[in-house]
Image (cartoon, rainbow, N blue to C red):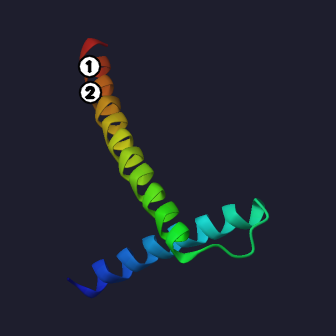
């Protein structure tokens, strides 16, 4: 793995952990079990994967719509 890919992967993971820590803090938790923390991170990973697929599908549909619109105009 290149240094750039490794750095981006670590940055994404850190952002997920920061998000989870922020959510837990807002809910009033100062500490949670490591197993629970990891389970919650897995939920975030699954949601990110789904959101990524939806985002790519949306981008693709926007391109299709733009092409169709420009051809018809």
Q: Residue at x 37, y 76 (%)?
A: 8
Q: Position of residue 40 (x, y in %)?
A: 52, 61
In terms of depth relative to the viewer, which is nearer, 46 or 14? Answer: 46
Q: Residue at x 31, y 13 (%)?
A: 73
Asked where in the image residue 6 lies, by quadrant, the reply is bottom left
Q: Position of residue 26 (x, y in %)?
A: 76, 61
- Please identify the residue farthest to the left as the structure is shown: 1
Q: Position of residue 60 (x, y in %)?
A: 28, 35
Q: Residue at x 37, y 39 (%)?
A: 54
Q: CA distance from mark 2 to mark 1?
A: 6 Å
In terms of depth relative to the viewer, which is nearer, 10 or 72? Answer: 10
In terms of depth relative to the viewer, which is nearer, 50 or 27? Answer: 27
- Residue 53, which numbered label? none
Asked where in the image residue 56 lies, by quadrant, the reply is top left
Q: Is residue 40 left or right of residue 3?
A: right
Q: Is residue 61 left or right of residue 12?
A: left
- Please identify the residue farthest to the top as the structure is shown: 72
Element class at badge 1: helix
Q: Residue at x 51, y 67 (%)?
A: 16
* Classed neighbour count for the residue bearing mark 2: other residues with Cα under 10 Å, few (<14), some (14–19), many (≥20): few
Element class at badge 2: helix
The residue that mark 2 highlights is 64
Q: Is residue 15 left or right of residue 12?
A: right
- Residue 68, which numbered label? 1
Q: Position of residue 15 (x, y in %)?
A: 53, 70
- Please identify the residue farthest to the bottom as the structure is shown: 3
* Classed neighbour count for the residue bearing mark 1: other residues with Cα under 10 Å, few (<14), some (14–19), many (≥20): few
In terms of depth relative to the viewer, which is nearer, 22 or 43? Answer: 43
Are the two marked residues, 2 and 1, in contact with CB atoms closer than 8 angstroms?
Answer: yes
Which one is closest to the eye, mark 2 or mark 1?
Answer: 2
């Amino acid at each position: 793995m290149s240094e750039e890919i490794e750095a981006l992967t670590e940055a994404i993971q850190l952002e997920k952990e920061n998000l989870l820590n922020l959510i837990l803090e807002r809910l009033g938790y100062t500490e949670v079990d490591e197993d629970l923390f990891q389970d919650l991170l897995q939920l975030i990973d699954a949601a990110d994967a789904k959101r990524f697929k939806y985002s790519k599908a949306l981008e693709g549909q926007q391109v299709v719509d733009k092409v169709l619109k420009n051809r018809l105009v």
